Image (cartoon, helix red, strand yellow):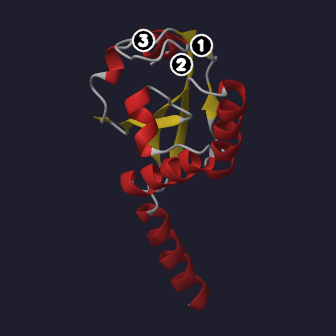
Amino acid sequence: MVIHSFYCYFVSKMKVMKQHRCLISIGSNTNRDVNIKLAQKELSIHFQDIYLGKEQDTIPIGMLNPAHFTNQLAKCSTTLSIDEVKNIFKKIESQAGRLPADKIDGIIKLDIDLLIYDNLVLKENDMKKDFIIEGLKEFEL
């Protein structure tokens, strides 16, 4: 009886821990190699099943800083909420030295965005960017 009760409890908890599918964009235009590698390493720690797409060199659009970007898409699954995922991203960005004031000067040390969470598109305008459209082809999404 005890084993059956434990099994029922365990199964009920497993149903609650739904896996959510995430599409992530990573970008940097400052110390790009180091910051992208930091993001890859840290994201791999938090999301064990992460798949990292190809890195893409892109030109800045609508920014004063002419420095090129390294951009990359990633996909993973998680039981975390949207806010929990975004908090992880903010911590990783902080590790790279990202400061709110840098954005004014077009300095993007590291930017990690949650584009899609399950079927919810969180960054519709970003989904129109060439590097994202190109990266999606790799994922067959």
State which tag comes first along the sequence, 1 or 2: 1
Q: What's the CA distance linking mark 1 and mark 2?
A: 14 Å
Q: Position of residue 115 (x, y in %)?
A: 39, 32
Say which element carries label 1.
Answer: strand
Q: In which quarter of the image is residue 106?
A: top left
- Label pair 1/2, CB-CB below 8 angstroms: no
Nearest the viewer among 112 and 101 is 101
Q: Which residue is drawn at 47% across and 17% down?
A: 65
Distance of label 3 from label 2 (alpha carbons): 10 Å
Classify mark 1: residues with Cα within 10 Å, few (<14), some (14-19) or many (20+): some
Mark found first going from the N terminus, 3 or 2: 3
Q: Which of marks 1 and 3 is in front?
A: 1
- Residue 73: image tag: none
Quarter of the figure that contains the C terminus: top left
Q: Is residue 114 above or below residue 133?
A: below
- Residue that carries the numbered disc 2 in the rendered image: 139
Would residue 93 appear left or right of 49 to someone viewing this image?
left
- The residue wearing badge 1 is 56
- Residue 116, image x, y percentages: 37, 34
Q: Which label's residue is closer to the chain start, 1 or 3?
A: 1
Whether residue 113 is situated above or below residue 139 in the rendered picture: below
**Circle 3 residue:** 133
Q: What element carries label 3?
A: helix
**Type of amino acid at the residue the image marks with label 2:** Phe
Callout 1 amino acid: Gln
Residue 117 screen position, x and y as percent:
38, 40
Q: On screen, 86 above or below 22?
A: below
Question: Amino acid type of disc 3?
Answer: Ile
Circle 3 Cα neighbour tier, 10 Å, few/some/many (<14 / 14–19 / ≥20): some
The answer to which quarter of the image holds residue 50 is top right
